[in-house]
């Protein structure tokens, strides 16, 4: 059975019972009434009764995954406030993400972590970082709202040198960057680590490890619907993605018979565990070896694309149309494997 409740800038009601009071006129939040659906059996919140695609799924008691707003968004809640990993595509989706965040916690967003510079992971940065009245930003915000942390490669690709036009608004840029292998944060009673994965999907990818909750938010290094979207121009390589997947496997621990245990939130797709990452890693390793062998034999890109080296995996991960096709993946793999060390 699903329950409907209406959210406004003044109140939230669940099954007719007032759940919380919100401050009127909160900047950055929708002012109109919106019906939200909650499924108590599965613990799922839907941002809009007319659009069930944008929803928040429970992962741990204080960890949720928001899907349908671009790349998957990881949400950690607690006494310190809300921490968000990635912010989706932005625009109209940001309002729906805000609606869900209001249902998950009555506290403000205190931290935003970006796993990549890609627009489907950072498009909502500017919309989500405005601190609600009485909330204020966390450390490092510089008075500009909620701080945004990312690898320095993310800032480099979202900004631009002086005198040039940046591809993204200034207020969407990371305010805290790191250049080492990891960046530590202690928030909501647990250690949170941003782990840099060099030359994976891009040169600035991070995974986020919630140590106490035993959850990893992987960004696009791991995803379930497609082959990895390796961005060669931005420094991505197939071998870097495989190294990142192996790093995930070093951290994850299955509960029983290789199932359960550490939960893995991919950049796109469903909630996973170690066994899912093993399957994806093995697939990519096999395809990598096939393409590498073809390169050693002097095959051209066109010959490799026509050779059907991925055909046994195409029914699950392949595509002939859309933003990331099988041909595009093979080209990216071919280019990254053809580069001299």
Image (cartoon, rainbow, N blue to C red):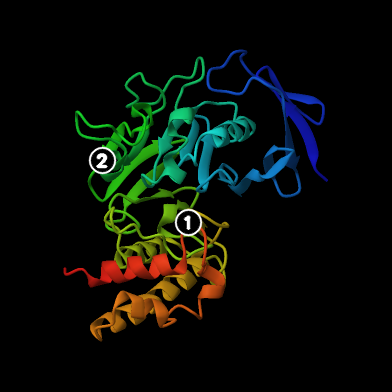
Disc 1 element? loop
Give the quadrant of residue 26: top right
Label 2 sits on a secondary structure element that is: helix
Decide: few, some or many residues near mark 2? Use Cα within 10 Å; few <14, some 14-19, many ≥20.
some
Q: Is residue 321 above or below residue 13?
A: below
Q: Residue at x 45, y 66 (%)?
A: 227
The disc label shown at residue 156, or none: 2
- Compared across the picture, whether 116 is left or right of 28 comes to left
Q: Quadrant of the C terminus?
A: bottom left
Q: Is residue 68 above or below residue 289?
A: above
Spot occupied by residue 269 in the image (x, y as percentages of width and height) = 55, 57
Q: Is residue 15 above or below residue 224?
A: above
Q: Position of residue 283 (x, y in %)?
A: 44, 75
The circle on residue 283 is none
Image position of 4 (left or right of 122): right
**Residue name at image x 29 percent, y 42 percent:** 157
- Foreground residue, 303 or 235? 303
Q: Quadrant of residue 309?
A: bottom left
Q: Which mark is residue 323?
A: 1
Q: Mark 1 Cα within 10 Å, few/some/many (few <14, many 20+)?
A: few
Q: Position of residue 140 (x, y in %)?
A: 32, 27
Of the residues under marks 1 and 2, which one precedes in the sequence? Answer: 2
Q: Is residue 147 visible?
A: yes
Q: Residue furthest front?
A: 302
In this picture, residue 120 sits left or right of residue 19: left
Q: Judge from the rendering whether residue 107 lies leftward or rightward of residue 171; answer left or right.
A: right
């Amino acid at each position: 059975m699903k329950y409907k409740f209406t959210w406004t800038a003044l109140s939230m009601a669940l099954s007719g019972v007032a759940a919380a009071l919100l401050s009127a006129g909160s900047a950055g939040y929708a002012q109109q009434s919106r019906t939200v659906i909650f499924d108590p059996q599965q613990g799922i919140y839907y941002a809009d009764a007319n659009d069930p695609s944008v929803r928040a799924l429970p992962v741990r008691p204080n960890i949720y995954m928001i899907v349908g707003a671009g790349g998957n968004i990881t949400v950690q809640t607690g006494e310190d406030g809300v921490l968000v990993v990635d912010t989706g595509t932005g625009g109209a989706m940001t309002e729906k993400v805000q609606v869900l965040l209001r249902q998950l916690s009555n506290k403000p967003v205190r931290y935003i972590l970006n796993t990549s510079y890609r627009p489907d992971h950072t498009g909502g940065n500017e919309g989500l970082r405005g601190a609600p009245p009485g909330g204020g930003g966390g450390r490092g915000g510089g008075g500009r709202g909620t701080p945004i942390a990312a690898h320095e490669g993310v800032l480099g690709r979202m900004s631009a040198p002086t005198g040039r036009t940046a591809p993204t608004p200034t207020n969407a840029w990371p305010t805290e960057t790191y250049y080492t292998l990891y960046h530590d944060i202690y928030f909501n009673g647990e250690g949170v680590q941003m782990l840099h994965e060099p030359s994976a999907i891009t040169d600035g990818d991070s995974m986020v490890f919630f140590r106490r909750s035993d959850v990893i938010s992987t960004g696009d290094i791991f995803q379930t619907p497609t082959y990895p979207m390796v961005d060669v121009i931005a420094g991505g390589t197939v071998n870097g993605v495989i190294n990142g997947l192996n790093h995930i496997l070093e951290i994850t621990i299955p509960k029983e018979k290789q199932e359960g245990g550490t939960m893995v939130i991919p950049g796109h797709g469903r909630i996973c565990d170690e066994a899912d990452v093993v399957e994806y890693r093995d697939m990519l390793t096999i395809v990598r070896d096939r393409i590498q062998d073809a390169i050693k034999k002097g095959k051209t890109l066109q010959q490799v694309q026509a050779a059907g080296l991925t055909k046994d995996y195409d029914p699950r991960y392949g595509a002939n149309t859309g933003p990331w096709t099988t041909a595009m993946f093979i080209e990216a793999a071919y280019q990254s494997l053809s580069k001299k060390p």
